[in-house]
Image (cartoon, rainbow, N blue to C red):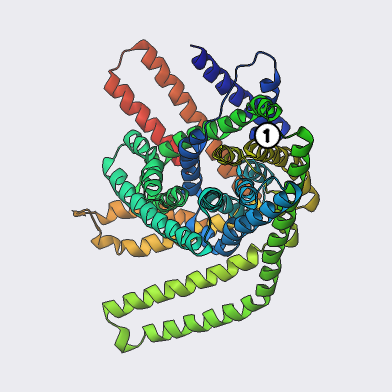
Amino acid sequence: MELLTLAIAALMAIVVAAVLSRRTGIATPLVLLVVGIVFSLVPSTPEFTLEPDWILLGALPPLLYATAVQVPVIDLRRSLGMITWLSVTLVVVSALVVGAVVHLVVPEVSFAAGVALGAVVSPTDAVAATAIGKRLGLPHRLMTVLEGESLFNDASALVVLRTALLAITAGFSLGDAVVDFARAVVLAIVIGFVVGHATVWLRSKLADPVLMTAVSFIVPFLAFLPAEEAEASGVVAVVVAGLVTGHHGSRRFTARERLTERTNWLTLQFLVENGVFLLMGLQVEGLLRDLDESNSTPTEVVVVAALVLGVLLVLRTAFVAVQVLAARRRQPRLDAMRERLSSISDRVDSMAAEPRVASERGQRRMSQFRRRVQRGQADVDYQESEPVTARGGVVLSWAGMRGVVTLAAALTIGTEVEERTLLITVAFVVAVTSLLLYGGTLPLLIRTLGVSGADPGDTRDEVIDLFGDITRTASQALGPLDALVVDGQAIDPEVATESLAWLDRIEERRGDTTPEALTLASQRMLLHRHYISLMRDALHEEQAIGAYSTAALTQASALIDAQELRLER
């Protein structure tokens, strides 16, 4: 009964914190972290013990999967260099440098134990940063880098941590460590790829949004647990499975199935994501008690934590600066690359007209090659339209917040490490300070630097052009209306013409983006929404009366839902 009461209280705290966050602009995780810290210091508060497996096995896989499903693969590919640089290279270097600094300042802490501390504080948690970035409209490229980095840096950190702990007890071999890391990543990619494709196929056959969502809840664990059993990276396996699902799910799942799954996952992600920050804050009292019983002092913890924070910030700033400078050097080469791709495109078009490639197979190969050229041209346009500027680099550097994974990983440090309490407490102080300091000042930094995303008007025009392109492509793929056959059923030309007449009206209005036209469109949308609301009210009234059968009421409700879904497209 007491546990249930605490769970309800935690849920209410999360909801209240979310409402407060929307009114104050402070990220919800930061609010819950402070609430947890304050509550833990209140006398007679029940003791909350954070078990590492709760986070590393229970919360981390679904959180990673929920994020990976939403990240477009193409955006991840275009920023893969910077993401790998920050999530792998920076993590390894940070762990080694932090280990050396801590060993130098506190000689009682061995270098291997210092590296273990560096491993647990090196991965960033993008939850608070992305929450702030979405609210303030950060450029899409920066958001992709933050999310992509947080997806993969946990894997790098956990591998370095495992290697450091092994070095404390059984020695260390650099060659073996590199081989183990490569094996863990490659095997995890294979497992995640197989699990992702298999579950997408299975869910596409269920044809039931509820069953599909139920299956999706176990996908992260289907990828994570086998990978861990095979001594691979469960984190990488989950991320790959999520990326595969997000990429193929848009084509294999219906709109309602995707909408249902997205709603349920957003709810689960919201509760777990914010719940772990509340739980993190509740650890303060227990950590302070353990510190009192150890040989370390609060002053020592504060000094070491301040040094670690400084080292992490300097290293992150330097690594981001390297990427910003590299991007600047690539900019002059983009024009030359565009001209080269344009020349290749012209050659492909001329080759497509030659008799030797007139066969169906030849045309198919030309089409595939043309698509690659177009993708290359789009990549060049993306690099020019979404550069990582110096101001964006400052935001990336300051967004290096640590989260609950840092504390959970620190708790896995065994009792064989003599300064275990010191390391865990320092990790907690680093995580909390980075969240409150960086998270609390990041909105001001973004506003001061004037870093913002795409203009809404430009996005609207782009959507109009995109819709025109995809409707033309679909019309061409449909073929002549007088010989149209769908699923073996011949379609009457008059029915086809009448059904597709709306495409012509959309094409005629593509260029009509005047305020008057947009106002009329918004009025029609508003009226339609209001009418659907009135229909739903009338349906509820009929349900209360009970004059119609349940089947009739259910079908009527489904028709109203379908109309409402059309407005969301």
Q: Which residue bears the numbered disc 1?
A: 30
Question: 518 left or right of 55?
Answer: right
Indicate the position of residue 528 as horizontal and vertical percent values: 50, 35
Question: 403 left or right of 481?
Answer: right
Pick the residue in front: 365 or 309: 309
Indicate the position of residue 195 as horizontal and vertical percent values: 34, 50
Residue type for callout 1: Leu
Dividing the picture into quarters, in which one does residue 296 lie? Answer: top right
Element marked by disc 1 = helix
Residue 322 vs 392, above or below: the answer is below
Dividing the picture into quarters, in which one does residue 208 lie? Answer: top left
Density class for disc 1 (Cα within 10 Å; few <14, some 14-19, many ≥20) is many
Pick the residue in front: 118 or 10: 118
Indicate the position of residue 7 as horizontal and vertical percent values: 52, 20
- What residue is rendered at 29% in x and 60% in y? 481
Please indicate, yes or no, whether residue 458 appears anywhere in the rendered image: no
State the residue lying farthest toward the left: 488
